[in-house]
Amino acid sequence: MTGRARIDGRAVALAPGETILAAARRAGIDIPALCHRDGLSPQGGCRLCLVEVAGAPRPLAACHTVLHDGAEVTTDGAGLRALRRDVLALEVAAHPRGALAGAGELARLARRLGVPLGDGPAAGPPPGAVDDAHPYLRFRADICVTCRRCLRACEEVQGRFVYGIEGRGALARLVAGAAETLAESACVACVDACPTGALDDRDRRGAQPPPRATATTCGYCGVGCRVAVGVADGRVARVDPVAGAAVNRGHLCVKGRYAHGWQAAPDRLTGPLLRDAAGRLRPVPWDEAVGWLADRIGALRDAHGPDALGFVASARTTNEGCYLLQKLARAVVGTNNVDSCARVCHSSTAIALKAATGTGAASACFDDIELARAIVVAGSNTTEAHPVVGARILQAARAGTPLVVIDPRRIELARHAAVHLPVAPGGNVPLLNALAATLLARGAVDHAYLAERASGLEALAAHLLDRDPADEARRAGVTPAAVDAAADVLAGGPVLFVHGLGLSELVQGVDSVRALINLGLLTGSIGRPGAGMLPLRGQNNVQGAVDMGCWPDLAPGYQPVADAGVRGRLAALWGAPPPVAPGLTLTGMIGAADRGELRGLWAQGEDLAQSQADGRTVARALARLDLLVVQDILPTETAAYAHLVLPAAGWLEQDGSFTNADRRVQRVRAALPPPGEARPDWRAVRDVARAMGAAWPEEGPGEVLAEVAAAAPALFGGLRLDRLEPDGLQWPCPAPGHPGTPRLHLDGFARPAPLAALDFAPSPEHDVPGFPYRLVTGRVLEHLNVGTMTRRTPDLALAPRDLLEVSPRDADAEGLADGATVRLESRWGHADVAVRRSDRVPPGVLFLSFHHPRTRANRVVGPAVDPVSECPQYKLTAVRIAPPRDDGARRP
């Protein structure tokens, strides 16, 4: 700070570009304001923040007047008070008598300025003034003061552009864009911005603030937003963003803010259920459930060997729950048959990154979004699957950061991109090869970086010289001109590569990610601030599940189970070393169960019957198991096959830690106890281990995390629960007192990163006769994965069913009206779904979400997997459209 000014006679140091209002508040001087909100652009519309500046001919709005060196500012005085009172009185007079009496921030300002709001109770809204159609929000037009705070928050934070102002002067009014109601709009909650309560939360209406709030981490996607959970009368009353949180900066999506109703759902699992001889699940005490399970696991191990059992850890539970489940498998049962849902989403990414850089996780962090020179988003519908990060990317693009979007659909970010590459499903490798070849042909690569940090440049160049970039582009379904335009963006220097399941969930998933890493190396991006690889993780603790060793050949901290040093350290901690031979992947476990080779399976927080590809095979495999343990918070499709169901605590009900997509280990706290006899996952696993004779000392998640630190000191040695305040620590964090590592590879790689020469390999789902369409499956904003939690909240009203997106051209060719029901058929199965005509998908491509059990979307997806990662191919299935059995899909 340089220079000084005076505000109300008080000396104030200057900050570059700081407004009078901001400087005054920093100095503890309160200037009234109505249309202003910190973090949003200044509006200058309400005129309540007018101040006198020496030498200025008239009062100036403090919210957008920069404080200059030597300025003398007066913020209070009889004239200013009268002016503010008159301005606010005119606003109050424009509304029905008494309507603004309870209008929150405005009412407090009115009392401060001496403006009467009317006697008696507030007037009721006139007919038609209330929009109550949204399940979470209500809008009262009669008390809206058109301050534009919600509009600016919507645009500048969320990037949704829902609101607009219709009319001018006294006739101006807020409207929800082109939608008739908020429920029909894309609103995702800017309600906190409203100063009058015109826009408010339906579930908070008339409620007092909760007596307490618990700081914790959201349990939905892998962004890891910090939240404050308010509890009243034994129930979650509200969830608010934490204003200063490093990850979300006071921002939440519709799920994180509102979709907490699952916690009190009437069908919550509240006690263990054991299937009896008649085939019914009956309640049993925990002691009986634990003893039965310990005996059953031991009997199967003794009869068929330890590898007859498998363990699937949850990406929704804590690090501590995941760690203890893999410890049970390895140290007590004696098998490496342990995996997690990362297998079916991010295994391709982790394997590709480890092969290239030595670490199978993000090299960049979320803060690199704002630092980036350019951003590539590949295979990620970020604004729907990871809305808070998506909003940050969108705002960076709006601020001028060049954005390249690689996605078959015209997703929201594509509308803000400098270049959209609508790659054909399965066409990532030829597209990324075309980009690499173009950069090499132009000489637009970072040769100094490559010489120092990479290997294989000559081999890659020779490989790509055999290919015409234009031919590769056309093979990928993209025009050569679009590839050239994208290369223009990449050629400028380091780039931030944000990527998702559109790369990994293919038979060329590993190759797709390796091809993207090629671009990261060629542009000198990996290991530089504002650049590098940033894979987005799907569920809240996908990263943590793999970090904790829920992987068939890796112990906690990505340590090979066959390494002698690792085995010795773990044997000292566990009392027994892990087995040497790698175990089965999740995909391999399903196949082994179907063949009768895997006899028992523990599924922790994963609804395998609904979420796994090739659903018919999965159902058959689950039915053949001698033992299926389901550990979950709610009844699932998989629980229908279970021999034992263990009730789990949800993310609002347990302590421990989660790890988000940029390797940030954050604190999780119980805001309220789990219902009935439900238990945190870590505790249930520990109790079974003890019943099997293990001397496990863990009495709480803090002790478990301390053991994690001892098991994998290079990455986690400095982690303790009490060190995770306020914003967590990003691993590697190798020692107590270490600050964590936001970015990897700043000093280079352990060995030169190999560039990969890759060929396009057509999928078994390419060019299948009789199945002309290519199906892509994925998420929508309102739901998470198979919807176990979100379908038990009012989000169900926002997205009540899965929809099949069909291009208008294909819909016309098939004779389909919007909303028509069709049968979607593949060689593997079918689903009856409703059609949504959408220009987001190109002709020949269909998109289907998979959130609702009645859709059975994953029974349409086939058995194809990446040969290296065994990740299923959710992003490409050959399908056709047929009438449903009642033939009601087509127009007359």
Image (spheres, rainbow, N blue to C red):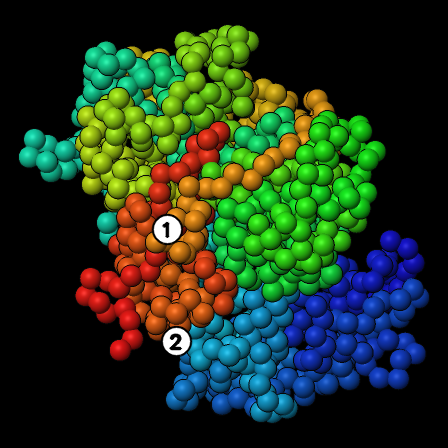
Q: Position of residue 192 (x, y in %)?
A: 54, 65
Instruction: Name which quarter of the figure residue 20 lies in.
Output: bottom right
- Residue occupied by mark 1: 769
Image quarter hosting the C terminus: bottom left
How far is mark 2 from mark 1, CA to CA? 50 Å
In the depicted structure, whether residue 587 falls above or below residue 418: above
In the displayed structure, does residue 317 sit left or right of residue 112? Answer: left
Q: Earlier in the sequence, mark 2 or mark 1?
A: 2
Instruction: Name which quarter of the figure residue 806 lies in.
Output: bottom left
Residue drawn at 90 percent across, 60 percent down: 4
In the depicted structure, whether residue 252 falls above or below residue 459: below
Residue drawn at 69 percent across, 80 percent down: 45
Crowding near the residue tagged with mark 1, few <14, some 14–19, many ≥20 C-alpha atoms within 10 Å: few
Residue drawn at 37 percent across, 30 percent down: 586
Crowding near the residue tagged with mark 2, few <14, some 14–19, many ≥20 C-alpha atoms within 10 Å: some
Determine contact: label 2, label 1, CB under 8 Å: no
Residue drawn at 37 percent across, 32 percent down: 587
Q: Position of residue 196 (x, y in %)?
A: 53, 75
Q: Nearer the viewer, residue 445 or 329?
A: 445
Q: Position of residue 463 (x, y in %)?
A: 68, 34
Q: Secondary structure at mark 2?
A: loop
- Residue occupied by mark 2: 132
Q: Amino acid at mark 2?
A: Asp
